[in-house]
Amino acid sequence: MNKSYLYLFVRFVALVAAQVLLIDHINLGGYINPPLYILFILLLPFETPGWFLLLSSFFLGFSIDIFSNSVGLHAASCVFMAYMRPTIIRAVGAPAVYEGYLSPGIPDMGTRWFVIYSLFLILLHQLAFSILESFHFAEAGLIFIRMILSSIFTLILIVLIEYLFMTKRK
Amino acid sequence: MRHILAFIWKHNFFFLFLVLEILSIVLLVNRSYYQRAVITNMTDGFTGRINSTYSSITGYFYLKQENERLAAENSMLWQSLRQGQLTTDTLTTHLVDTLNRQTYRYTVAKVISNSTSNRNNYIMLNKGKRHGIQHDMAVISPQGIVGTVVSISDNFSWVMSVLNKHSKVSARINRLNQMGTVLWQGNNPGRGSLTDIPVHVKVLKGDTIYTSGFSHIFPEGIMVGTVESIKVKEGDHFYDIDFRWAADLNSLTHVYIVKNLFREEQVELSKEIIDE
């Protein structure tokens, strides 16, 4: 278990670095900035304790925040997403028996399951994010378009990354 | 009491969520100068170092554009030199200029972090308190306006880009001398919008917009942009003007931080009026 926490820490640092040094510098027409780092929350193992899920998500969001001078914005959306994760897992269908160290990624759960599960959580994250970022009824249409575009793009990116770093299970 | 504790313990997931979510939203909404300064001082040493290393690597890719920009600016400055002008009046020479006093001080700074894709964009610069940077200083590039300094640590500062919900700059259309307010609607980082221009004046496509200098932050006559499209909503007394930013906000490398040396005096004076 200690080894897996170390592994999680490495993933945390790698995703934050990828987000602030790479993704944030790619210009996609100015409309969207896909939050790749939430892959960390998506991939936490099933039996992660609730407090760890929430606290690690808070610190994940906070780390991104201090790089973009938006303290609280990413943290709030991440904590909301982490809070909804158990509900979404139950709704999409949790595995019957947790055999050891199962993680909700493609290798353990299959592509179809992962896409549905991620789509819901990404949408929830983007919903919280867009509302907190610019709360204006006048901008509702723009917020909605941005939310949908950004979610689709993030989903594609996350599935690609999953395939790229997939290690075969025995 | 024991029951309450047992209840909280039983639902600890929900309560921890509530605590963290409220904490985040309070941090987000309550952005006083003091709180901002505390957070900035704690985190900027770390993020600043990472951002400077990053920009020192990527800086090489923009050297060509940056050189062209500097050459263009140099030629402009040469033109304004005394040697570049023909002296027509041989009787008067100014040896010591006692008539003009310096109003603005310019500090060059390097952009070490920038974004254009969020609703509220901020830019990080490699100059801070130690270099005499203060709140509400203007930031301009050789092409046009960029933003306003909003928080500072010892060695770094954050600039609120004009691509921000909270950014408001007083500007005027040069040809007409009409004053308006420059905002950003959040849909296209290449375009800003100018409001408060009354419909009785005739605005044309291609008109240039300059800063008015009325806000005590930006010097007068800094380029803001050129008018792209002009619309009027029925029954409205003001135009909806879209314009193209003069500065390419997505490829900034070096900018000037402008200190208005008379700002304190001007703010003090306007306070007197408000108090009365």
Image (cartoon, rainbow, N blue to C red):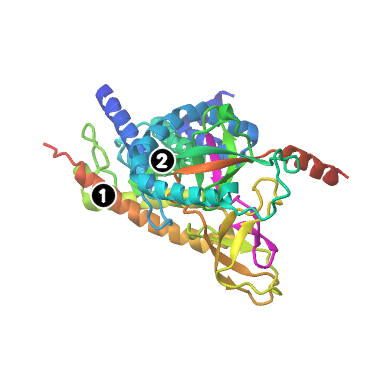
Disc 2 residue type (three-letter): Ala
Describe the element under mark 2 as helix, strand or loop: helix
Q: Is residue A114 visible?
A: no
Looking at the image, residue A137 lies above or below residue A93: below
> Upstream in the sequence, badge 1 or badge 2?
2
- Which residue, given by chain and number where applicable, does mark 1 sit on? A159
State the CA–CA distance, disc 1 to disc 2. 19 Å
- Residue B180, magenta (yes or no): yes
The magenta segment is B157-184
Quadrant in the picture for residue B269: top right
Residue linked to disc 2 = A82
Q: Position of residue B93 (x, y in %)?
A: 70, 45
Q: Picture coordinates of residue A85 (x, y %)?
A: 38, 43
Residue at point 20%, 46% (across, down)? A163
Camera sees residue A1: yes
Task: Please tell me how crowded label 1 is: few (under 14), some (14-19), or many (20+) other residues with Cα within 10 Å.
Answer: some
> Which of the two residues, A169 or B100, is positioned nearer the viewer here?
B100
Q: Residue at x 70, y 53 (%)?
A: B89
Q: Is residue B118 left or right of residue A1?
A: right
Q: Is residue B4 above or below residue A119?
A: above
Residue at the extreme front of the image, as rendered: B90
Q: Nearer the viewer, residue B239 or A159?
A: B239
